[in-house]
Image: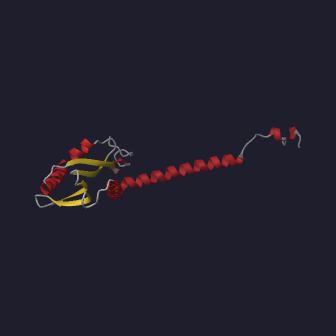
Amino acid sequence: MGSPTKGNDETSRPKTNRGAERMHDRARDDEEELERRQSEALREWRKNGEARKEFGREVGKIEHQDWQGEMRRLAESRGHKEGKDYAIEYTLRHPDGSTVRYDFVDFRNHHIIDRKPATEGEKELAISKRYLDQQRRYIEAYRAKFGAEPTFEYSLYSSTKNMPSPADGNGKKK
């Protein structure tokens, strides 16, 4: 042990933990790097409207496929047979000669379900108003083919429009 007057005594040195300080510095540097990368990605995302549209289309496809798998498992767990009791991506000819394609149709109960994206806070009523013509055509085609009045509902999923956009930086319109 050295002399306290020479400053080499354990009690005269300030207690520090160099390892903890280095870990804290690295964590701060990592956080700054993450923020830099996120800002850069956001700038690129905002610049490329076509990429955002393509991303939205891809998300829609995935959402539909996952949901269709869930609907298939649910129907089959109830003893329903695809193509007889229900159908997924079912196409019918409309009386005007065009075609309509249902995301899901339950033939037993005459029920149509359409999968649609919805922005944050958007309710089924707003979706229904936006797609009213499409809904009417679906019902008309079903009625013409099966002679029954179907019920109709929407199954909603989160729209990619909630993601950051040029509008104000966080994806929400002002």
Q: Nearer the viewer, residue 32 or 90?
A: 90
Q: Is residue 56 visible?
A: no
Q: In the displayed structure, does residue 85 sit left or right of residue 19? A: left
**Which quadrant would the C terminus be assigned to in this image?**
top left
Residue 2: x, y in percent? 88, 43
Q: Position of residue 106 (x, y in %)?
A: 24, 53
Residue 50, picture quadrant? bottom left
Question: In this rendering, would 1 be left or right of 133?
Answer: right
Q: Quadrant of the N terminus?
A: top right
Identity of the residue drawn at 82% across and 41% down: 10
The residue sitting at the left extreme is 96
Outermost residue on the front side: it is: 79
Whole-percent x, y for residue 151 in the image: 20, 47
Is 173 or 101 nearer to us in this picture?
101
Position in image of residue 49 (x %, y %): 33, 55
User: Is residue 125 visible in this depiction of the protein?
Assistant: yes
- 32 with respect to 73 (left or right): right
- What residue is at 58 percent from the left and 47 percent from the top? 28
Name the foreground residue: 64 vs 34.
64
Give me the residue at 13% from left, 53% from top: 147
The type of colouring in the image is: secondary structure
